[in-house]
Amino acid sequence: MKLCYNAYVDGFSHDFETIKEQQNDLGRLVLMRHGQTTWSKMGRYTGRTNLPLTAIGKKQARFASLLLSGYNFNGSNSAKQVFVSPLRRAQETAGQVGYSAFQISQALAEWDYGNIEGYTREQLSMLIGHDYNIWIDGININTSSLPIPKAAEDEDGNRIEVAHLPGESLAAVAARARRFVDQINMILQSKQDVLVIAHSQILRVIACTWLGIDPKNGGKFVLDTASVSTLGIVNGLHCIFDWNRTAPIVD
């Protein structure tokens, strides 16, 4: 049984067959986080540092393709309904799940973390003296007293340059999310599904945008690597059909 959470009605309701009946055949917005990278494995904030997938990350994505069956993305050779971040880890994930053609959307790039790029939550918590929460504390943390983050590397030891960018506010991330949702709205209204392959934080903000809630609530939506989540419309209301589904890796 699938459960649908409606942001405007308290609690969970409806089994999946009822949800399908109430959708009126509107398209579904499917969110997929990229597979594991060396930094996601270590818990380092990875915004625009352009890391590839690990071998495990590629496996995660391949098995997660099973979770995408039943959706209508017009086949693996159509780019019309598949939107992917410009960053390498998301595009490699798209290839692993079988989509060689897709639209690259700059709006789907991960949050530009600025000064905190490459650090862990534990490091930042020790620095500021309390549990760091990016959704509340933001990214404007003075990290000059911390060691400079070690360079990123892939599993073969190839050096990946750490992104040193100005950073962006949560409001700026939310504005990007809003532009993207507005962009794909006509596709969903035309009863076609849309697949988005991107990153943890931007996908959480897109979910908040979809539900019409403050993006600061993004931290309440757990997203594992290579997870698949589905948003949709029931009786005219934006809701969550399912969230953070992952597929086991079978060797």
Image: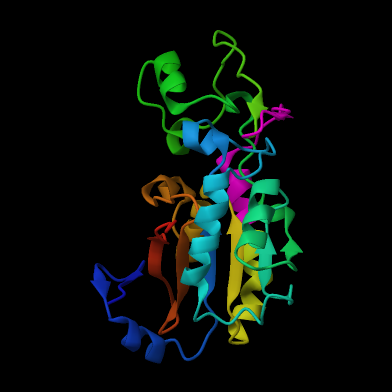
In the displayed structure, 131 sits above or below 198; it is above
| Percent of width and height locating residue 32 | 53, 60
Q: With respect to residue 3, does 217 lie above or below?
A: above
Vertical position of residue 25 compared to residue 51: above or below: below
Q: In the image, 143: left or right of 107?
A: left
Specify the segment rendered in magenta: 155-178
Verify whether residue 165 appears in magenta: yes
**In-front residue for pair 9/145:** 145
Residue 114: x, y in percent?
A: 64, 29
- Viewport quadrant of the C terminus: bottom left
> What residue is rendered at 56% in x and 15% in y?
143
Q: Position of residue 103 (x, y in %)?
A: 75, 65
State whether residue 33 appears in this view.
no
> Residue 17 versus residue 137: which sits nearer the camera?
17
Viewer-proximal residue among 138 and 118: 118
Q: Residue furthest front?
A: 251
Q: Residue sitting at 36 percent across and 84 percent down?
A: 19
Quadrant of the rendered structure where residue 162 is?
top right
Which residue is pictured at 68% across the width and 75% down the height? 76
Q: Residue at x 41, y 21 (%)?
A: 125
Q: Quadrant of the N terminus?
A: bottom left
Provide residue 137's location: percent of width, then percent of height: 46, 30
Colour theme? rainbow
Task: Residue 225: tell me if it is visible.
Answer: yes
* Residue 193 relative to residue 244: left or right: right
Magenta stretch contains residue 89: no
